[in-house]
Amino acid sequence: MDQETQSIADPELLGDVMDLREAIEQAEAIQHIADIESNIKYKYNECIEALKDSFEKSDLDRARQWTISLKYYTKLQEELDNKKFRVR
């Protein structure tokens, strides 16, 4: 994350977050929401494993990057949880 602009510096993460946010906004069916949730959980778990690996290797720069990713996937899950209540 660029500390001055508070934006995502990783273009891959930015694209993924934007795609998931758009999918959440457009989701109208419970099954579609479940599919999105599965994707977010997969990405979240991927971040956790990479974060563990980074700490084991004392790679703090990489750990910082994975922490930023984790923050975004956590926020996306919160947005999806809110969406679930509106779709039901």
Image (cartoon, rainbow, N blue to C red):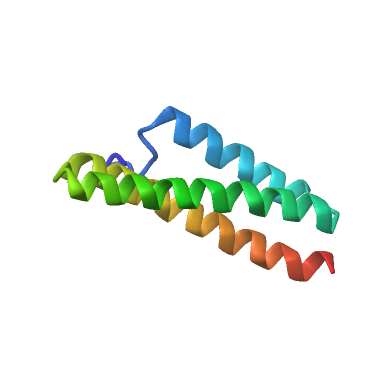
Q: Residue furthest left?
A: 58
Which residue sits at x=41%, y=55%? Answer: 71
Q: Position of residue 51 (x, y in %)?
A: 31, 49
- Judge by depth and name the residue closer to the eye, 18 or 5: 18
- Judge by depth and name the residue closer to the eye, 2 or 31: 31
Number of on-image labels: 0
| 2 relative to 47, above or below | above
To which quarter of the image does residue 6 belong? top left
* Residue 3 shows in the view: no
* Residue 41 shows in the view: yes
Which residue sits at x=84%, y=53%? Answer: 28
Which residue sits at x=79%, y=67%? Answer: 86
| 32 relative to 5, above or below | below
Q: Position of residue 23 (x, y in %)?
A: 71, 44
| 56 relative to 14, above or below | below
Q: Position of residue 78 (x, y in %)?
A: 57, 64
Which residue sits at x=45%, y=46%? Answer: 46
To which quarter of the image does residue 77 belong? bottom right
Quadrant (top left/top right/bottom left/bottom right) for the N terminus: top left
- Left of 9 or right of it: where is 73? right
- Left of 7 or right of it: where is 23? right
Quadrant (top left/top right/bottom left/bottom right) for the C terminus: bottom right
